[in-house]
Amino acid sequence: MEEDDDDVLELTQMLQDDGRNDPDEPDPWRDEPAFGGMADPEPVFHDPDPEPPPPPPRPAVKRPAPAFDDFDDDEPPPPRPRIRQSDLDNGLISRRVAEESSHHFTHLARQLGDDLSIGPMPVGVRTVEEVVRELLKPLLKEWLDENLPTIVERLVQQEIDRMIRRSQKF
């Protein structure tokens, strides 16, 4: 530790021994006034005219919310934007693969709708995620029944061991 202090002291001494930082020698940058001998004038601060206070905000005009009677049900929805063939070609899958996949998912949904163990399922009402969730629920329950006690026992034992190690350190 003392060697580090000596090194810093030696570096400081080297700077003072350099000759460029002699305190008795005048500094040309500090001693010459800027712009031909004229000293900088003292800055004069003027109080700016106070700005007039801002006008008060306008009160918000409350418009009544449209009633459901205001909507016209007889109007057809706006037309969908046309999809260009080049937009379809830029997808991750081809149109043929998308149609085949859609067909298979529709077939799966119909088959699951006919299966009475899952219950009646109108086509188009449930998503694939919901169907998968229902199918995986019994499998997950079975796995948890077999493995959860072992997992909990192992985690509790690890925490107890950790607490014992901490208490032994103190």
Image: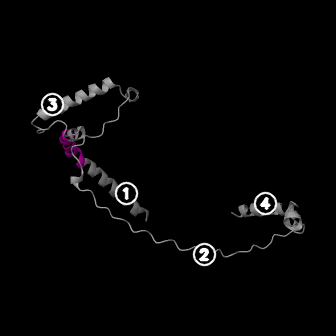
Is residue 143 shown in magenta? yes
Q: Earlier in the sequence, mark 3 or mark 4?
A: 4
Q: Mark 2 packing: few (<14 Cα in 10 Å), some, or many (20+)?
A: few
Q: Earlier in the sequence, mark 2 or mark 1?
A: 2
Task: Identify the secondary structure beneath mark 4.
Answer: helix
Quarter-wise, where is residue 87 in the image?
A: top left
Q: Mark 4 packing: few (<14 Cα in 10 Å), some, or many (20+)?
A: few
Residue bounds of the magenta highlight: 134-149
Q: Mark 1 packing: few (<14 Cα in 10 Å), some, or many (20+)?
A: few
For disc 3, the marked residue is 111
The residue located at (58%, 73%) in the rendering is 51
Task: Identify the secondary structure beneath mark 3.
Answer: helix
Q: Which of pointers 4 and 2 indicates the residue nearer the eye?
A: 2
Coordinates of residue 160 in the picture (x, y in percent): 33, 57
Task: Identify the secondary structure beneath mark 2.
Answer: loop
The residue located at (33%, 64%) in the rendering is 62
**Which residue in the rendered view is the most extreme toward the left?**
116
Q: Judge whether 159 appears above or below 105 on screen.
A: below
Quarter that holds the C terminus: bottom left
Q: Earlier in the sequence, mark 2 or mark 3?
A: 2
For disc 1, the marked residue is 162
Quarter-wise, where is residue 13 in the image?
A: bottom right
Say which amino acid is labelled 1: Arg
In this picture, residue 91 sits left or right of residue 124: right
Q: Marks 1 and 4: in contact by CB < 8 Å?
A: no
Is residue 107 shown in magenta? no
